[in-house]
């Protein structure tokens, strides 16, 4: 397992792997790796000859007042998880390596990035799309792996790849959950014991919405209301949004194909997101 923080070295290793006929799989992460990431790396391992993982807490995607400074950093444990999962290379650059001068160029995926989290996290998806394009240009993967837990991020990246004719495939990987339904997330480690006990309410609410939709309800307001009832019974949960959206992350009054229920919920000061396909 190669570990480097250097762009040039990463390019050299990737070029050598490609020259030996191997396809390049890429898993971009912000570290604090968990079983969800293990799923991403494992899928890449099964499908590609060479697997690169990036670990970079990207300042561009955090709005002022968000958790950039306290985002969990756990490089030693992350290296072990990558080794275990069969990764070939870790690219873990410093902020100075990624942004040696003021970044003046940005990627903005309008419409898809505007609703849901985009309404509450100003500049977030611009920061994500910009760093992901930059990471793609360093790693030049054939296939890049993203978790379905971050539904809107996945939609933003897929659209960026199509709109900009990037020569790679985006591969979605299903959300990994704790036994009680809580979606795996690096931010789960912020939760107090009481918040952790309450946190599965998010998935219960999404599942309820799904049940109502599968039962034949087409009116998205009613589907949304059914989910919200579940969340409102949990005193520790404060809903930021609970919405039914189409593939472009837009609200629709009638159920579309596909459609998703997507939620952002605070437990104390920790903001959790999750979604379900209806
Ligand atoms: O999902 C994440 O961990 C990040 O948003 C990503 C895709 C690595 C970009 O910083």
Image (cartoon, helix red, strand yellow):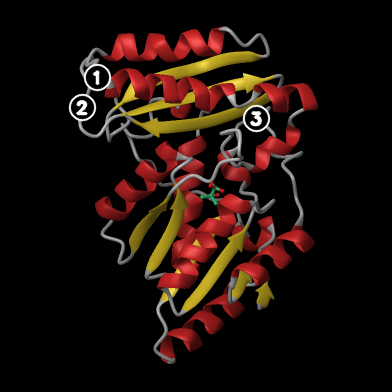
| Kind of element beneath mark 1 | loop
Residue 30 in view = no
For disc 3, the marked residue is: 64
| Along the line of sight, the residue nearer the viewer: 243 or 160 | 243
Residue at image location 54% in from the left, 70% down from the top: 52
Work out whether mark 2 precedes mark 3 in sequence or the reverse, and give the earlier one: 3
- Specify few, some or many for label 1: CA neighbours under 10 Å numbering under 14, 14-19, or 20 or more: some
Dot 2 and dot 1 residues touching (CB under 8 Å): yes
For disc 2, the marked residue is: 256
Residue at image location 52% in from the left, 78% down from the top: 11
Q: Say which quadrant the N terminus sits in.
A: bottom right
Which picture quadrant has residue 166? bottom left
Residue 131 in view = yes
Q: Is residue 106 above or below residue 180?
A: below
| Kind of element beneath mark 2 | loop
Q: Say which quadrant the C terminus sits in.
A: top left
For disc 1, the marked residue is: 252
- 142 sits left or right of 101 in the view: left
Residue situated furthest bottom in the rendering: 20
């Amino acid at each position: 397992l190669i570990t480097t923080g250097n762009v040039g070295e990463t390019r050299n290793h990737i070029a050598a792997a490609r020259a030996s006929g191997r396809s390049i799989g890429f898993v971009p992460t912000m570290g604090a790796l968990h079983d969800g990431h293990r799923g991403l790396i494992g899928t890449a391992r099964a499908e590609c000859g060479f697997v690169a993982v990036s670990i970079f807490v990207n300042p561009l995607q955090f709005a002022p007042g968000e958790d950039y400074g306290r985002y969990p950093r756990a490089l030693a444990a992350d290296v072990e998880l990558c080794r275990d999962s069969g990764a070939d290379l870790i690219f873990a650059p410093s902020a100075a390596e990624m942004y040696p001068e003021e970044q003046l160029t940005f990627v903005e995926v309008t419409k898809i990035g505007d609703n849901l989290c985009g309404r509450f996290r100003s500049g977030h998806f611009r920061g994500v799309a910009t760093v992901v394009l930059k990471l793609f240009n360093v790693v030049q993967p054939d296939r890049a792996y993203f978790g379905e837990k971050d539904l809107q991020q996945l939609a933003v990246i897929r659209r960026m790849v199509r709109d900009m004719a990037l020569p790679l495939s985006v591969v979605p990987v299903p959300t990994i959950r704790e036994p009680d339904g809580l979606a795996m997330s690096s931010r789960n480690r912020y939760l107090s014991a009481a918040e952790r006990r309450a946190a599965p309410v998010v998935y219960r609410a999404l599942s309820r919405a799904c049940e109502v939709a599968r039962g034949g309800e087409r009116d998205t307001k009613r589907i949304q209301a059914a989910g919200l009832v579940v969340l409102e019974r949990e005193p520790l949960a404060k809903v930021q949004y609970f919405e039914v959206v189409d593939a472009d992350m837009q609200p629709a009054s009638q159920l579309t194909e596909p459609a998703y229920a997507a939620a952002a919920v605070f437990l104390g000061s920790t903001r959790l997101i999750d979604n379900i396909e209806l």
